[in-house]
């Protein structure tokens, strides 16, 4: 085992944890949770809950709970899907779009601050390297890590 590779992967796990925490703080600036933000973004103008779950790599049931919360809060609504009786569209309302815009503004500010704090870094290279790792991990058979 390559100790550098192992250390880098552990750093990725830590960065992932910290990014999730930051996502919660950024979303909270608009009175939302990170889960609500992700479902609203994935819904776009309209999408079914199963489509959103596939896009996010989540279980349909957990996305359904968040979607129902969004509808109850007036940030989204359900519309009939002419192609599937039971799988309605989740549609972002004006209030949902406004919440997303506020989150996106807070996110842009957070990224700008992060870039200033980190300093000189080849972000494009980092993104490409992480994409390569993601593809490699996604193509490997499941085993204990």
Image (tube, rainbow, N blue to C red):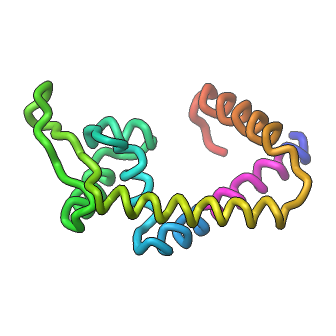
For the point 53% across and 58% down, which residue is it? Answer: 104
Q: Give percent across and percent down for residue 12.
A: 73, 52
**Residue at position x 41%, y 74% from top?**
31
Residue at the image point whose x is 69% and y is 29% from the top: 136
Can you give x and y, in whole percent of width and height, for residue 27 in the image? 49, 67
Tell me the quarter of the image containing the C terminus: top right
In magenta stretch: residue 98? no
Tell me if 54 is positioned left or right of 75 in this view: right
Q: Quadrant of residue 20 in the image? A: bottom right
Say above or below: 25 vs 15: below
Asked if residue 13 lies in the magenta stretch, the reply is yes
**In the visual, does 54 lie left or right of 18?**
left
Q: Magenta part mainly helix, strand or loop? A: helix
Q: Residue at image x 47%, y 73%?
A: 28
Which of 86/27 is in front?
Answer: 27
Q: Exactly how many numbered labels are in the figure?
A: 0
Q: In which quarter of the image is the N terminus?
A: top right
Res. 139 image quadrant: top right
Asked if 122 appears above or below 26 in the picture, the reply is above
Q: Residue furthest left?
A: 85
Q: Give the range drawn in magenta.
A: 6-19
Seen in the image, is 137 located left or right of residue 51? right
Whole-percent x, y for residue 140 in the image: 63, 28
Left or right for 20, reference 112: left
């Amino acid at each position: 085992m390559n100790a550098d590779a192992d250390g880098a992967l552990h750093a990725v796990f830590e960065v992932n944890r910290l990014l999730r925490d930051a996502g919660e703080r950024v979303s909270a600036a608009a009175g939302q949770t990170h889960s609500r933000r992700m479902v609203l973004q994935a819904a776009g103008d309209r999408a079914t809950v199963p489509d959103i779950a596939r896009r996010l790599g989540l279980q349909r049931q957990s996305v359904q709970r968040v979607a129902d919360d969004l509808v109850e809060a007036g940030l989204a609504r359900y519309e009939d899907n002419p192609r599937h009786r039971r799988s309605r569209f989740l549609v972002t309302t004006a209030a949902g779009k406004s919440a997303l815009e506020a989150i996106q503004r807070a996110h842009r500010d957070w990224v700008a601050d992060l870039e200033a704090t980190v300093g000189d870094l080849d972000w494009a290279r980092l993104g490409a390297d992480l994409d390569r790792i993601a593809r490699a991990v996604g193509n490997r058979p499941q085993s204990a890590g």
